[in-house]
Structure formats: structure tokens, C-alpha cells
Amino acid sequence: MTPSPRLERVTPATVDAALALRVHPHQEKNVAPVARSLAEAYAYGETAWPRLVFDGDRLVGFVMAFLDIPWNEEDPADRRSGLWRLNVSADAQGSGYGRFAVGAVAEELRRRGATEMYVTWEPGEDGPGDFYRRLGFRTTGEESGGQVVGVLGL
């Protein structure tokens, strides 16, 4: 069955379900839990864009973008936007929801005038690097907090 996902804002009616969302246990070292993401979204205000991924009434994921943030302290003109966080529920993985969420972030960034979309990921065989490369991200050769930096042209 082809997924028919959609993004929704986090609301009082959906926050408990968002907090309960879990990735596969072996992926927990690669992505922060939704609770941390929501705290960061609150702290970073307008530079964070958190959304829930639903298919029908079923919550299948969480995605958060970063919007026009200063990237390099040595170069104040280096501002970037991209995918900050992606959590797909363990029981919903492999159904296209991650691909949908990344595409939805890309569309939002295009709408805001961005020409590139950045992402960082934990290196290693259990990390999401292969997933991002299949979506067209290429590594930049940079690291951010020990993570690989990838970029996708929009």
C-alpha cells in the first residue's frame, strides 16, 4: 500500500503521541528522542520547524528542520537550513515515510528561498548515511559535532 502521509504541527492533542514515538532500539544512539527535539524547538523558536508525520490517524514520524542558522562562527555570512531531526516509528520504517518527510522539508525550504538543504548524521554502519545518500545528499567533507555533514541541491 502506498503511504499517503501528511505533516501536521504538534498540538496539545498530539503531543503525548509525539512523546511516545520510538525508533528501533539499535537506532536510538543515532537520533535524539522527540522530547529533546521539542525542547530544542521551543528554545530555538523561529529557527526550528517541527512537524509530525501522520498517515491517516496514525502517527508514523517526527521531522524537524532548522531555518537559516549561523553555521560557522568564523564566517557570519555562512547561514544554512536543513533537516535537523528525523524519527520514524520502528513499526512504520521501510514504508516511505522517511523519504516523504525529507521531501516535505525540502519543499518547505524551497518555499522559503533556500537552494541547498543540509543534514548531519552519525557515522557508522548503523547510521542513516546510506539512507541520506540514496536521497541524493552528498557529503561535504565537513563534520559538525562529530557527525558527517551532507548537502542536497534544491
Image (cartoon, helix red, strand yellow):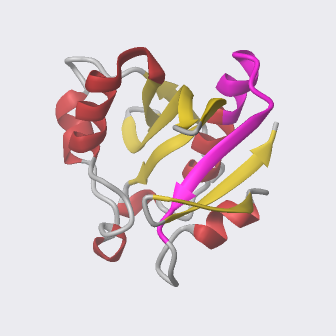
Position of residue 6 measured from the top left corner of the image (x, y, whole percent):
54, 30
The question of residue 119 being in magenta is answered with yes
Residue nearer the viewer, 17 or 146: 146
Q: Quadrant of residue 48?
A: top left
Give the residue drawn at x 54%, y 68%.
128
Q: Position of residue 72 (x, y in %)?
A: 56, 40
Residue 118 on the magenta segment: yes
Magenta-drawn segment: 106-122
| Residue occupying the point 43% across, 59% down | 145
Q: Nearer the viewer, residue 4 or 88?
A: 88
Residue at (34% x, 61% y) in the render: 23
Front-lying residue, 82 or 100: 82
Residue 105 image-quadrant placement: top right
Residue 19, horizontal then vertical, whole percent: 20, 41
Residue 70: image location, x then y, percent: 54, 30
Query: Viewer-proximal residue, 4 or 75?
Result: 75
**Left or right for 3, reference 92:** right
Q: Residue furthest bottom?
A: 125
Split into 4 quadrants, where in the image is the C terminus? top right
Q: In the image, what residue occupies the spot 51% across and 28% down?
A: 7
Instruction: Please tell me how many numbered marks the rendered image carries.
Output: 0
